[in-house]
Amino acid sequence: MKSFILFLSLLTLQCLRATSRTCHVDDETGLLEFKRGITHDPSGILASWKPGTDCCTWAGITCLYNDRVTAVWVQGQPDKPDGFLSGTISPSLAKLRSLDGLYLTDLRNITGQFPVWLYGLSNLTYVYLQNVPLSGRLPTDIGKLGTQLDVLSLAGNRFTGSIPASLSQLTGLTQLNLAGNLITGKFPIGIGSLRNLTQLQLHNNQLSQPIPEIFSSIHQLRFLNLSHNKFSGKIPNSISSLSSTLAFLELGHNSLAGQIPSFLGNFQTLDTLDLSHNNFTGPVPKTFSNLTKIFNLDLSHNSLSDPFPVMNVKGIESLDLSNNNFHLGKIPNWVTLSPIIYSLKLAKCGIKINLTNWKPKETYFYDFIDLSENQISGSPIPLLNRTEYLVGFRAAGNRLSFDLGKLKFAGTMKELDLSRNLVFGGVPNSVAGLEKLDLSRNSLCGKLPPTKFPASAFVGNKCLCGSPLPACK
């Protein structure tokens, strides 16, 4: 009996110790000093960080072993006007010696440069400093972050200068994201040393010169986004070595030129291909018929020419072939038969059909359709009256002829452009709920309903009147 009572006493004592235990004093000090560096926290993101309480219980703090802080998550709330922090990132976080993950995202109003004190944290594996926004040049010795680092994401800041060569020393990286900064210079050849990379995102910067031939050494790459830069030259041949792994290839909005390489048709797992807004010429390779699993294809705003290959894709979701030199004649069957398509953009593609007779297999998912600058006749009513979630419809510069008053507007509709057609009838009251509207140069007639749109949205019609046009007689 005595031994049982002793056992209960020891168990109670152990429980009391466990419940009274707090995080390591260095961790608490480091976190509270970080909080003191924050000058404005209007939504109380750090409200639970109070002296004398267990910092392992604070919002955004994780302690996995020995009561040491292993992760710090401080996230703003972009959907709330006051969901941000102002101030600086205190170097006191270097006191968190067991830290393996630092996640500071969407803070929106933090100032300062890259925190070089991170070099002293030997367990650091994940660094997310996204939309903070920090500024200045990336340090030349950024490679001191160590080979244990798995993820480095510095997206959405204001970093300038070139990508440091020492980045090649971070050989443990699987994800590198420097998107949405002001980085200049060329694509560093040293990235080819990061053999474990699965994601490389350098989009929305000011990088220039040709993309180097470095991809044959990065065999596990699945996401490559270099769009919205100033890259020139051709698509590197070494990208062909990624045919069995790459799922997302985004090179749009650059100055790339030449013909689209035929090896892109051999990519077995390609989900998304964006080559838009470049200077590509010639026909699309016949090998594209092998891209049976592609969901998103954007070749718009180039100088590509006929013939366009017959695709064997089973379900395209998003397609944009606009503003090339194509003469498709009709909307391709593989588009018409897609059960999951939601975005179709075929502006200036040489399409000559009667839209009344176009019967796509599925219209439920459509949210945007652009058929502008073609030779399309008939009426869009059978198509648009079957859509539930359409946000935008553009068909300017065609030969559409129908009564606008019979057009059903989806509750989600925000944009409608039917300018330069043969549309007749009156303008319905429902257009007032749109955000963008152009009905100019048609055969519309009657008094306009009250809207916020300027006269340019209605000029060139047969007999429209009323504000913002001249008053009806």
Image (spheres, grey):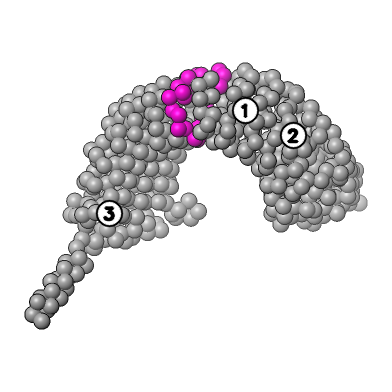
Which residue is labeled 2 in the image?
A: 347
Find residue 131 and report its horizontal and vertical position in percent: 43, 43
| 195 to the left or right of 418 | left
Please report contact status of discs 2 and 3: CB closer than 8 Å, yes or no.
Answer: no
Task: Look at the image and give the residue range highlighted in magenta.
Answer: 209-235
Residue shown at the point (34%, 34%) measured from the top left: 172
Find residue 70 and report its horizontal and vertical position in percent: 28, 50
Residue depth check, mark 1 versus mark 3: number of the one nearer the observer: 1
Relative depth, front residue between 468 and 376: 376
Residue shown at the point (75%, 43%) measured from the top left: 337
The stretch drawn in magenta includes residue 151:
no
Mark positioned earlier in the residue sequence (2 or 3) = 3
Residue depth check, mark 1 versus mark 2: number of the one nearer the observer: 1
Classify residue 169 by image quadrant.
top left
| 104 to the left or right of 402 | left
Relative depth, front residue between 109 and 464: 109
Task: Name the quadrant of the N terminus.
Answer: bottom left
Please tell me how crowded label 3 is: few (under 14), some (14-19), or many (20+) other residues with Cα within 10 Å.
few
Check residue 64 in the rendering and tell me which mark sits there, or answer none.
3
Please tell me how crowded label 2 is: few (under 14), some (14-19), or many (20+) other residues with Cα within 10 Å.
many
Q: Amino acid at mark 1?
A: Gly
The stretch drawn in magenta includes residue 211:
yes
Find residue 440 and report its horizontal and vertical position in percent: 81, 41
Which residue is labeled 1 in the image?
A: 265
> 420 above or below 41?
above
> 117 above or below 61?
above
Separation of disc 1 and disc 3 at Cα?
Answer: 47 Å
Residue shown at the point (48%, 51%) measured from the top left: 78
> 57 above or below 117?
below
Relative depth, front residue between 213 and 350: 213
Please report contact status of discs 1 and 3: CB closer than 8 Å, yes or no.
Answer: no
Mark positioned earlier in the residue sequence (1 or 2) = 1
